[in-house]
Image (cartoon, rainbow, N blue to C red):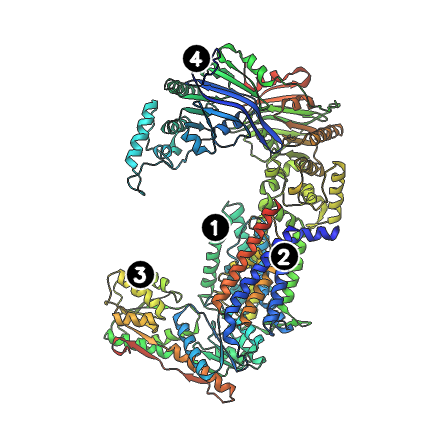
Amino acid sequence: MKSKEFLLHNARQFGTLFGLFVLVILLWILTPHFLTISNLLNVAQQTSINAIIAVGMTFVIITAGIDLSVGSIMAFSGVVLASALDAGLPLPLALLIGLAIGMACGLFNGLLITYGHLPPFISTLGMMSVARGAALLYTRGRPISGFGENFRSLATGEIIGLPAPVIIMIFIYIIAHFVLTRTKLGRYTYAIGGNEEAAVLSGINVKFFKTMVYGLCGMLSGLAAIILTARLNSAQPIAGIMYELDAIAATVIGGTSLMGGEGRIVGTLIGALIMGVLRNGLNLLGISSFIQQIVIGSVIIIAVLIDMVLKRHKK
Amino acid sequence: MIVKQSKSAEKDPVLEMRNIRKTFPGVVALDDVNFTLLSGEVHILLGENGAGKSTLVKILSGAYQKSGGNIVLFGKDVEIKNPRQAQQLGISIIYQEFNLISQLSAAENIFLGREFLLSPTIIDQKRILDSAQSLLNDLGVNIDARQLVGELGVAQQQMVEVAKALSLNAKILIMDEPTSALTKNEIIELFAIIRKLKNRGVSVIYISHRLEELSEIGDRITVLRDGKYIGTHQISEMTQHDLIRMMVNRELKEQFPKQKQQIGDEILRIERLNRQGSLNNINFTLYRGEILGVAGLLGSGRTELARAIFGADKIDSGMIYVDGKLQIINKPRNAINLDIGYLSEDRKAEGLVLDLSVQSNICLASLGRFSKFGVVSNKQEKDAASEYVKDLRIKTPGLNQKVLFLSGGNQQKVVVSKWLCSNAKVLIFDEPTRGIDVGSKVEIYQLMNRLTAEGAAIMMISSELPEILGMSNRVMIMREGSIAGIYDTDNVTQEKILQNALGAA
Amino acid sequence: MNNFRYLFTAVLLILSVFLLLSGCQRGEKKDAEGPLIALVMKTLNNPFFIDMQRGAEDAAKKLGVTLLVQAAEREVDVEKQMQIIENLIQRGVDVLCITPSGSKEIIPAIVKANKADIPVLIVDTRVDSISLIEAGGKITTFIGSDNFDGGRIAGEYIVNSLDGKGEVAILEGIPGHETGDARMSGFHKALEGKKSIKIVTSQTANWERDQGFNVFQNIMQSYPSVQALFSCNDMMALGAVEAIAAAGKTGQIIVVGFDAIKDGRDAIKKGTMTGSVAQHPYEMGKIAVEEAVKVINGEKLPGYIPVKIELIIRENLN
């Protein structure tokens, strides 16, 4: 009984997981290069940046919002972080600055949405342009490159054979899962997205928690910026263009409803992995990048289609 | 076909609705209703909230499909499938909320969807303007057809609606509460225009609660009650008292398990509460152990009062005392901290997060109690929720079930649990038994008894007069944003309540 | 249970799409026994790289080697390019030819290829040599033309055409790109000491045609007497040409682009554009594959293999 209930409650996530599983089997059959430890670690590492941004996106989308500015925020916090490192600031301080910049942009988004009463689409669309411009202005358009080994180890380091970005990603997912399921912030995130009016009438400070969710999303973009900068050994003001769409795609494939109120953090991880595995697999098979775009686009559409069909069936 | 002439029918009937039945899932909205409309008459449709007036006219205007019965229009059987067809048959309806686009001109509104064309894509603006202007002039109203509807006053917008109906060659015009937003002079003008329409042979179905104006404009009146046809009369033969009796005269068929509680100390006192446009100088006191029934028509300010006390809407002035102390309530959180709970009228839209579990919904307003440093203790939360599930006998397969999948009665119990869980001592229940089966209703009533026995106070807003009379200690009647009277339940009848609510002499 | 059936159907659907698409690609790579050369480009939505791809493919066919061509969706997305390289390393290609999207950012990927003992040939855009040495990476050779030289040639042409005096505008590429920077500094070098020639403005149009149109339209508003334009690629130059036509000034402003792509050559033939520095991407692609084969055969390569660069004007077109 208990396990059946568990299965039913997570039907959507199991479906996505099943999809990932079948994809893995298929690639295993199609190419001998796919199912090797080194390639799987490779996929996990490549997924990490999108997966981390998608965590923030999941929170935002559960509140029935959207954040289009994550890619630009990532670029902006990246270049500020890089300049802090360049200026010789201690590593922990520089990292903190990177996260703080991301969080500040996110909080600003949140304030515009809650107190400014702007639709999330508009305020984050504005922030997308503002943060990008700020990044370009701050660097005069030039990338900032060349960092110390300590910083770079955030992307190149390994612990018990796992690349650092993968460890960071796992860590973030564990925390995010905990926050979403076991804390007030998480519960209110669902409540706000599910029924904002009911949340207000239940005495929830909706404006505060919504602002926090956007702040969190911005901060995670800052974290992604750290990994990206360490990985490329360079912070580009033009980094992360269209990353918001990848993050939204991972979230949606993972079963989070754009209508808000529903979604699982684990689903998002699977969604991000599906996108990563697809890209990796299509590369390994030597399939043209044009077709890759068609495949990834189709997966997004089909995932959402399944969702709709499932929902209609339930009601 | 020879129609048997009744004494009132010197004129021909243009419309006959026979044995009309309309059911919604679980509810019979209209049961065997008959309605006859004569050519050139103004026919009043009267009844309480939920009596079935709106349902009846919506069937006529094609917004709803009838479940049974037949409609004879100009001697022919018709099926009205959608609003467009109703218009083609010569039936137009003017709702209380106008169906106009404020960014378009009066002329463009009148001919919206039926524009005159110069070519398949180009609109003949001049012809539209000229026709609209002549329609408005015909009505004798002073409106420039080029003016944007948004810039017109309410009465003028109504005239645009009337002109629109005329441009559709309406033979039957339905007006839903047409005077509710008009001033005295505007009402006089409106009546003049209605008489003009009558003379042209247009029949008007007129829905209103304002008893005093009915005899002035109406010819005949049909009264509905609880979805049933009560009777049709010449209005000149009826007194206001007769009408009220027809509207309410129903037996208390449901059993109300009211237990009289010892009324205790004052728990909530409202003084001189005002809110622009909805509440006007409200004063009353609520005592421990009592149920205060709040009656009034839709739009009389009942829900607005509840929301104002709860901090969901801002008030302009006034004082709220809780346990004798003056308090400032700016937002629901303040009210909840003062142990006030609000069970809203629409539980799906305002009371519940349907995608969340039973447990999460029960604890939603008091999550702070179950958490430390923002981390929720699953165990404490679960214990509390399961206690309420057991106590209130909420039927659910588990605490993790989404409330979406519960029945109406059980959903309502979840909302009540939410406020019990937040320790509410003042409970504002807005239509607590709406859309709930009879068994669950009784359970909710018993629960109210238990709560008052434990010293809580309940303010129960309801449109069901028997429920109010059966459950309350006192009845507060609201009308147009003010309190029209407060009575002990023992000294009041349904007629009296309705008289107060309608403002009848 | 119904839910699961739906899910299952849907998953099957995904798979069939996937299989279908991969199926239509499989045919050409059956002979995976021969040497496998990968060419990773910045993007495939630029005619320059499409020419390069054609050159590489023709060479591969002639030499009987298997060629994999991959590119990121967006030219500036170094991270995606890095992912592609990582994935190709996993695939175990014999040689990697790369046109870097970022001259510094690509270095970690090169280092990874080095570790996997896969020779790396850099094509078209140089990597930052100091950063490369610092990172301990190495490349087998650089195949490309000297962008600096190209810029200088364009500059000299404009100086001569203007008889040593006049107002000049520049359309830059995306700032921070090695390619654009080198072209710019070559151009500046040619104008050094020419006091009567004034660079009135130098703005970016992000390599793109539509932005080239807008930016140059604005420039003509602010500097109506501008007489010549140097654009760091043809796409932006072609945008500017449209803007000039829209202003009715066709033929009155000297426009020199870079890359001599097909559209650019057509414009030169029509006389709407004055000239373009030709880089011969087809040659680059062809040489890249030829050199890659030499590497596989154990030959030593020089560190720089130049590809000819020249200014195409109407007179020397074909």
Q: Chain of mark 2?
A: A
State the residue position of label 3: C217
Q: Do tag 3 and tag 4 residues touch (Cβ < 8 Å)?
A: no
Q: Are marks 4 and 1 on the same chain?
A: no
Residue at image point 42% right, 28% down? B89
In the image, C53 versus A30, the foreground residue is A30
Distance from Cα at disc 1 to Cα at disc 2:
33 Å
> x, y percentage for residue B67?
55, 30
Residue at far front of view: B1
The spot of residue C292 in percent (x, y) is: 48, 83
Callout 2 amino acid? Gly
Badge 2 is on which residue? A15
Q: Mark 4 = which residue?
A: B10
Disc 4 element: loop
Question: Mark 4 or mark 1, which is nearer to you?
Answer: 4
Position above or below: B422 against A50: above
Query: How far apart are the alpha carbons under marks 1 and 3?
Result: 29 Å
Cα distance between the residues tagged 2 and 3: 53 Å
